[in-house]
């Protein structure tokens, strides 16, 4: 009896959680329909709520925005809009901070979240999976005696939260693991092991002891 019950849980739990997450995303994106005039909102026209129309609208808006801003006129419009935001003190700081992060994450040339590392955390005898976010800024780098890298250590099972540290480059081990595999490993709290890769990574060795 217990065996069959656990087997049923293994089938329904991941399926239910997947449906719940997808439904949450769809409901959130459907809120974009509220930006339309009430007279042309789908719920008013159809007479009932049809899930997913907000997703279609969001994808269409994002695609159309990319299409428009890909030419010279669109780029001038973006520069004009950013110049307007630059005149608003609080909005300026918030907008450009988010823009820098998004440009770094979505850029094909950036190094942010491209490498999966092992770092010693929270003490010298423990290891944690981390993502390399880049190198220290000049003001920080000038104050550090050795070569350091910026790392983000996500928490489990919610990797959207975590800690940001600067760690000596020689004290990290680069893993031959993809970012997606590492996220699955963290979310599952080590239950879902990432697949083995054919080529081992050329990671650095720890030549000096870790100092807490």
Image (cartoon, rainbow, N blue to C red):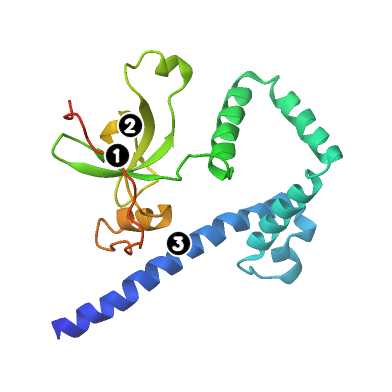
Q: Quadrant of residue 29?
A: bottom right
Q: Residues within 10 Å of mark 3 (few under 14, many from 20)?
A: few
Q: Which disc is residue 160 wearing?
A: none
* Residue carrying label 3: 21
- Which residue is painted at 31% across and 57% down in the image? 185
The percent coordinates of residue 184 (x first, y second) are 35, 58
* Residue carrying label 2: 169
Q: Using the image as rendered, state which of residue 195 and residue 202 is in the foreground.
A: 202
- Which residue is painted at 32% across and 78% down in the image? 11
Q: Is residue 191 left or right of residue 163?
A: left
Q: Is residue 136 left or right of residue 34?
A: left
Alpha carbon separation for disc pair 3 and 1: 38 Å
Asked if the residue under mark 2 is in contact with the one under mark 1, i.e. CB atoms within 8 Å, the reply is: yes
Q: Which disc is residue 204 wearing?
A: 1
Q: Is residue 207 left or right of residue 203?
A: left
Of labels 3 and 2, earlier in sequence is 3
- Which residue is painted at 83% across and 43% down in the image? 71
Q: Quadrant of residue 152?
A: top left
Which callout, 3 or 2, points to the residue nearer the camera? Answer: 2
Alpha carbon separation for disc pair 1 and 2: 8 Å
The residue tagged with tag 3: helix, strand or loop? helix
Alpha carbon separation for disc pair 3 and 2: 37 Å
Number of numbered callouts drawn: 3
Q: Is residue 195 above or below residue 62?
A: below
Of labels 3 and 1, earlier in sequence is 3
- Quadrant of the image for the N terminus? bottom left
Q: Is residue 103 above or below residue 168?
A: below
Which callout, 3 or 1, points to the residue nearer the camera? Answer: 1
């Amino acid at each position: 009896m217990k065996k069959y019950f656990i087997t049923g849980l293994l089938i329904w739990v991941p399926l239910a959680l997947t449906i719940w997450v997808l439904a949450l995303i769809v409901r959130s994106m459907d809120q974009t329909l509220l930006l339309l005039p009430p007279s042309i909102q789908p719920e008013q026209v159809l007479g009932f709520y049809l899930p997913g129309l907000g997703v279609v609208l969001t994808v269409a808006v994002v695609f159309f925005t990319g299409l428009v801003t890909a030419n010279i006129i669109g780029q001038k419009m973006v520069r004009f809009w950013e110049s307007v935001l630059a005149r608003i003190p609080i909005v300026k700081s918030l907008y450009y901070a988010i823009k820098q992060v998004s440009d770094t994450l979505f850029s094909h040339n950036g190094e942010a979240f491209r490498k999966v590392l092992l770092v010693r955390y929270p003490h010298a005898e423990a290891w944690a999976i981390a993502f390399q976010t880049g190198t220290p800024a000049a003001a920080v780098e000038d104050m550090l005696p050795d070569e350091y890298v910026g790392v983000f250590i996500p928490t489990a099972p919610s990797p959207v939260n975590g800690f940001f540290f600067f760690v000596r480059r020689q004290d990290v081990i680069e893993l031959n693991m993809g970012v997606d595999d590492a996220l699955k490993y963290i979310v599952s709290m080590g239950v879902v092991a990432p697949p083995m890769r054919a080529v081992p990574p050329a990671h650095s060795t720890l030549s000096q002891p870790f100092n807490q």
